[in-house]
Amino acid sequence: MSLPLTRHNRPQQLLDAIDAANAGLDADDRAAKYRKLAESPYGFFRGTNHLYWADVWHDWRFALFGGLPETQTWLQGDAHAYNFGAYGHHDDRVRYGMDDFDDALIGDYQYDLWRLAISVVLDAQENVGLSHKGIRRALKHLVQSYHAELGVHLRGEVPESVSVETAKGPLKPFMDKVERKESRARMLDKWTEMTEHGRRLKRPGKLANLPAHLDSQLRKAINEAYRQTLTGEREEAKDAHFRIKDTARRLAAGTGSLGLDRFYVLIEGGKDHEHDDVILDVKHQPGPAGAALMNGQEKRAWHMTFPHEGARHAAAFRAIAEHPDIYLGWLHLKGVGKAQDDKVFSVRERSPYKSDFPSHKVAGGKQYRQVVKQWGRILAREHLRGARALHPDDPSRFSRAVAKRVDGRMDHAIELVTTLAVSYAECVAQDYRTFVEARGLA
């Protein structure tokens, strides 16, 4: 039998795309990541964001309720249920929202909304056990809450952020538990230890020593280049604040980002109670998955605006985040990783309160819908902030444009997202089976 004239078939395209996306990892990291992808369809979806973007980049459906310059905003870029969680930084207040902007880019709002909706289907199937009808009801609440939040903005109301004080439904006991059990002191106990030379990062386990040349380069970059990228209150901090106590390589972190070069840097910090030490998270930024789909003209315009991915990540974080990290910045390192490349890294504080909401503990469809409504509202607020950063002279431009596209057609908008999300989740499950069988991970 002759070979096919093209490789235009889903199984082969899928396997080729996954192998290409992970070609830069060494054999051990690639094997570890593939094992994570094989854990479940939802885990597979989380770790293959590049597949989603390749599938939807030219999808005609986005023109029905958007598809205009006015309906573009800063996107989170990897919107899914487990990218919502508790977080907190310098003020030690626990909040709930999105706090990961590695894949952030500018585009139509629906790319985020669709990806979040697909994740709701996969999460509801895997962790909540909802029926087909229950899933459709959850998706209806997601889309309605998203557009309702845009309406709140148009009416001039100021929505409340999700905190320990304002959390509702299943989020309330979750937030209370995070505030009660997590703190800077506990984070430092987990990741550091006291030695005869003072506090140091803990090894072995999830951290490992850096070779001398990389340790030296990282220390120099923190003290020089990184500090030049800071803004706000940390920009004027004294040298003693950034005195480096230790550095280490972070191992086996994340799903989609597993295998990326990542380091922890322990610095002196301030002198107030638990603020005495700060852990900086230094992470390689290869670029958002969606940006790979841009044409030549778009990429040139993108690079003129953001000279490198560190600048892009910081701009996105400051635009989208409700409470941007005061340690946010970037640095460059040379001769890093398997290929000994020159790479750009984001720098931010490791949050003492980082925790994912355990959706598998939700008791049925009613409670799940309460959580899903919060996700829709949080995503809308992020898009509003992102659009405001792009067009500060017309802060309502985005919400007006989306409202006009959806006006009188809300039922149609809900049905489009629901049909797309349910169908694509079926495709993810099929792709997952193809992957685990082809790679002998079943």
Image (tube, helix red, strand yellow):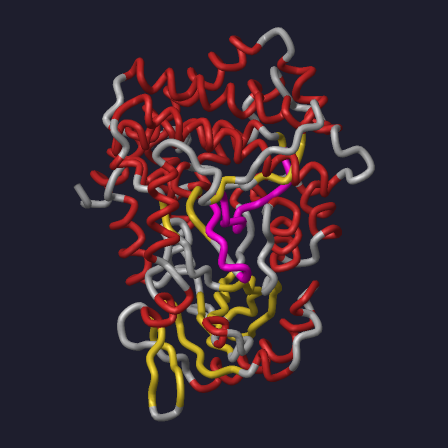
Q: Could you tell whether 282 is left or right of 149 in the image?
A: left
Question: Would residue 434 be seen by someone viewing this image from the given angle?
Answer: no
For residue 288, above or below residue 336: above
Asked if residue 92 lies in the magenta stretch, the reply is yes
Which quarter of the figure has residue 205?
Answer: bottom left
Residue at (39% x, 53% y) in the render: 179
**Residue 126, how many percent across, how many down?**
25, 32
Which quarter of the figure has residue 364?
Answer: top left
Which quarter of the figure has residue 345?
Answer: bottom right
For residue 346, above or below residue 86: below
Nearest to the observer: residue 319 or residue 353: 353
For residue 390, above or below residue 196: above
Residue at (73% x, 41% y) in the render: 390
Which residues make up the magenta segment?
90-107
For residue 371, above or below residue 66: below
- Quadrant of the drawing holding the C terminus: top left
Judged from this view, the residue extending furthest toward the right is 393
- Quadrant of the drawing holding the N terminus: top left
Residue at (56% x, 73% y) in the render: 333
Asked if residue 57 lies in the magenta stretch, the reply is no
Nearest to the observer: residue 28 or residue 370: 370
Nearest to the observer: residue 111 or residue 315: 315
**Residue 50, how many percent across, how many down?**
46, 41
**Residue 173, how many percent across, how many down?**
33, 41
The rendered magenta stretch, by its main secondary structure, is classed as: loop
**Residue 338, how many percent across, how many down?**
42, 69
Question: Would residue 31 be seen by someone viewing this image from the given angle?
Answer: yes
Q: Could you tell whether 115 is left or right of 346 in the image?
A: left
